Image (cartoon, grey):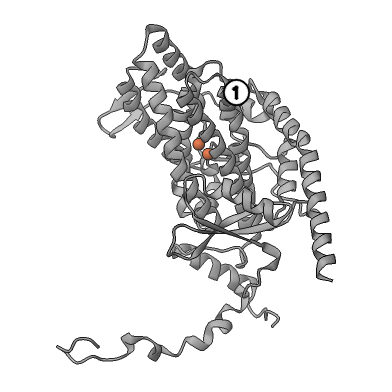
Amino acid sequence: MSDYTAAGGHGAVPTTGVPSDERGARRSQPLWEVFVRSRRGLSHTHVGSLHAPDAHMALRNARDLYTRRQEGVSIWVVAAADVVASSPDEKDAFFDPAGDKPYRHPTFYDVPEGLTHL
Amino acid sequence: MAPVQTQSTDELERAFQDAVDADGRIEPRDWMPEGYRRTLVRQIAQHAHSEIIGMQPEGNWITRAPSLRRKCILVAKVQDEAGHGLYLYSAAETLGVDREELLDLLHTGRQKYSTIFNYPTTSWADVAAIGWLVDGAAIMNQVPLTRCSYGPYARAMVRVCKEESFHQRQGFEAMSVLAQGTPAQRRMAQDALDRWWWPSLMMFGPSDTDSPNSARSMAWGIKRFSNDELRQRFVDATVPQAEHLGLTVPDPDLRFDEATGHYAFGEIDWTEFATVMRGDGPCNRERLAHRVGAHEDGAWVREAAAAYAAKQAGRGAREAA
Ligand SMILES: [Fe+2]
Ligand SMILES: [Fe+2]
C-alpha cells in the first residue's frame, strides 16, 4: 500500500504514487492579491489571493471569500502581475545598509538612572 | 539587479534545513528542495480537492434541512468548505502550479481526495454526524498544520481552523437534539454514528510510524505527528462526547486503559480504506461525475466573464488613447 498522511487535512491522502504537477501552460484566469482593512483606523493587510476575470469580479469574489464573518470594512485587490517585489536571493545585500546603524534605535543610548521623559 | 548565484546546492540545502529546524518559515520565492516543493503541492492540492468534494455529501441535505435555522447553518457550512478549497488552491499556486492543472488532476482521478466523502448521506442525522466526527477529525489534522514550515499553507490553515470549530459545534448540537429527541430520532442518531465511526477513524490513514516519507515530512516541518498519534487523540476526545450524547460507539473492543490513560480500540478494516481510495467506494463515481459536471456546466460563465473582461479592457485602452 502506498503512503498516506493524515496531515492531508480533511482526511488522509496519498503521499506517493500521485503526480504533483506537470508545469504545463497556464490557463487560469488572472490572479489577484487581496488586502483587507479589518476595521477603521487599521491598515489594509494581505489576506490571500484569488482568480477572477477582471478587477470588479475580483472585488466581489474577495468579499465572499475573505469577509464572510465581517472580517473587513474595506477591500483592495491588486493584480498579482503588477506587484513588484524584492528578491529573496539578494535579501542580505538589499537590506544590508540598515544592518550597521544601531544608532537609529533609542535603545542604542544610555539614559542616566533616575531620569525620566528621555 | 540580477541575483548572483554564489551558493552551492549543498549550502542552500543546509540553510533551508537550518531555517526549518529553528522553526522558521519558508516563503514562496525562497530556495527550497524540489522534493519539499512537490510534497507540498501534492498534499495541499489533495487537501483542497477534499474540501471541495466535501461539499457534496452535506449539500445533498440543504433542500431538506428540518428547519430554516438548520438550513441557514448548513448553507454557511458548505460555503465555508468551498472557501477552504479556495484558500488551499491559492496556497498551492504559490509553489508555481496552475489551478486549472490541479483541477485536471482531480477530474481525471490522478490526484485523490479524502476517502470519507465517498460515503452516502442517507439521513439527516448524517449531516450532524459529519459535522461532529468528520470536521472533528479534520480539526485534529489541521491544527498542527497552522505551524507548518511553509508560510502560505500555515496561514491558510489558521483561517480554516477558526471556521472548523463552528462546523464541529453545529454538528454536535444537531446530534444532541436528535439524541434527546423521540425514540425514532435517537435511532437515527445511533445509526449515523454506527456508519460514520469507522470511516472517521480511517481519515487518519494507515500507520505511518515506519514510513521513510513520513520521517522526511517531519524533518521538513510539514508533518508534526504520526497518523496513529492523531487518531488516538481523536478517539480520546470523541468517546466522552458520545457518552455525553448517550450513544454507543460501534466498537466492542473499545475500553479505557487506566495504565496508558488512553482509549484502546478495535482493528480498522484497511482493505475497505484501500478500496475506497482506489475509486471503488459507495459514491466515488457519483462524486467525481458531479464535480466534473459542475465544472463543465460552468464553462459558459467563465467564457462570458473572460469575454466581458477583454471587451472592457479594450474600451479602457481606446479611451486612454
Ligand atoms: Fe473544511
Ligand atoms: Fe469543515
Q: Position of residue B182 (x, y in %)?
A: 37, 9
Determine whether B317 is above or below B148 in the image.
below
Instruction: Look at the image and tell me in which quarter the C terminus of chain B lies.
Output: bottom right
Residue that carries the numbered disc 1 in the rendered image: B60
User: Residue B163 at what x, y percent from top left?
Assistant: 46, 42
Q: Position of residue B183 (x, y in %)?
A: 38, 7
In the image, farthest residue toward the top: B183
Viewer-proximal residue among A21 and B246: B246
Residue drawn at the location 42% of the way across and 7% of the way down = B184
Say which residue appears at 50% left-offset and 18% top-offset. Answer: B124
Q: Along the horizontal axis of the image, is B200 left or right of B46?
A: left
On the picture, is B134 further left or further right than A86? left
On the question of residue B39 being in view, the answer is no
- Taking the image as shown, residue A36 lies to the left or right of residue B89, namely left
Given the image, on which type of amino acid does mark 1 rest? Asn
Name the quadrant containing residue B162. Answer: top left
Give the farthest residue toward the front: B319
